[in-house]
Amino acid sequence: MHVALISGEYPPRWGGIGSVSYHLAGQLAKRGHKVTVITRRNRASKAPVQQGVDVIEVGWAPIPMQFTRSYGRKALKALKELHRKQRVDVVHLLLPLVSWNRAQYRKVVREVAPVISSLNGSWLGEREGMKLAARHREAATWKNPNDLAILLSGGWFSRFERAGIHESNLCVAISQSTKEEFIKRYRPPKDWRCEVILWGIDEEVFHPLDRDNEEMQLQHEEIRRKYGADDEAALSGEPDTKTPLLLAVGRLVARKGYRSLLKAMPAILEKNPSAKLVIVGRGHMRKTLLKQAKSLGISESVFIESSLSFEELAQLYRSCDLVIYPSYYEGQGLIPLEAMASGSAVVTVDHGPLPEMVDSSVGSLFKMGDSDDLAAKVNEELGESQLRRVKGLSGRDKVLGLFTHSHTASAYEKLYEEIRS
């Protein structure tokens, strides 16, 4: 089978969509399928090579939101040319980073192949998430050009998501929460079919600490010392440390909830005075967060890293004591799964898709936007060190059973076979 994967992100663009499209393509190729990825051109570097996967890069206008239309038009042209040279059996779009209107969808279904559209969250949901974050005083939306573009034009661009719902042969939501969101916002036709397939993660990259692996143990000790979270228990990888290391990962934008996290830190430090927080991400809020940490008197306990490699991030996941994910809006959210695969317990919000992955067996849920409840849940997890280790192991088992790239590829493979028959 020849699958054309239309994805606005693909390595070296390593956003969430870039990561899942890369791994889905690779897994499908390993299963014997031909995969062609049509993505945005990156002038800085080329896409990595995967056997059985071809990558076509097309031009796009570097304008917030508008790039989805320009990329969509170029991707459609490339798709038609690809099909002329080598028959395409299934077209798989990863929304919302490609914007086709209803006529364009119909043209592809009529002239190329059936279309599956993955619903990776919505522009309207992103907009509401930013508004919600603003109400909790996370940050001013106008400080980020991309956020401002979503705020001002998300409603207009939502027409292309509606087109995908009405004209795709099949839609796949990346969480039950996202499926319900699309039903509520777009009122799909009565015969609309939408499956739910959560994206998986790479369980070989994200795995627990192996204290018998000398190199890994040395890396662990280096990280703990780097952040001053290095008492004897911590260096040995034991959970009953008095110097707990907390980790938060994600773009430094308002809807990720970092200001609420920092606001919770004084209460966390009151019970765990030697705790350290590492935030890993890039974005416009770095200075804002550092300024807030200083005003709260917690600067010495907070670190922001903006340029870690995958290997360094993976080591941080397995070397930390707890991962915190305070996001206001996600289509799914891969960070909790990466943490769980690494053997780390997770504290995240009781909202949207996050409870579909995280429950009391692998961590804790707190009331979204409530920094007091967040602090309480973190302190509870840190106070139950042995239970926290059990939760970390349970998280690993849960990922291996449900949330790997192999699971995702297998589920999509069945849908491809179904809609092409």
Image: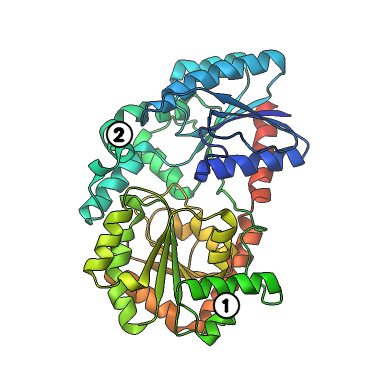
Residue 170, x across and y down, in percent: 55, 32
Circle 1 sits on which residue? 390
Secondary structure under badge 1?
A: helix
- Residue 121, by quadrant, is top left
Circle 2 sits on which residue? 149
User: How dense is the environment of label 2, judged by Cα within 10 Å: few (below 14), some, or many (20 and up)?
Assistant: some
Q: Looking at the image, can residue 321 be seen?
A: no
Asked whether 174 or 130 is in front, the reply is 130
Q: CA distance from mark 1 to mark 2?
A: 43 Å
> At x 64% / y 74%, what residue is drawn?
217
Residue 278, x across and y down, in percent: 42, 66
> Where the C terminus falls, by quadrant?
top right
> Where the N terminus falls, by quadrant?
top right
> At x 34% / y 50%, what residue is drawn?
253
User: How dense is the environment of label 1, judged by Cα within 10 Å: few (below 14), some, or many (20 and up)?
Assistant: some
- Residue 349, by quadrant, is bottom left
> At x 65% / y 58%, what residue is drawn?
203
Asked whether 171 or 314 is in front, the reply is 314
Give the foreground label among 1 and 2. 2
Please name the amino acid that badge 1 sits on: Val
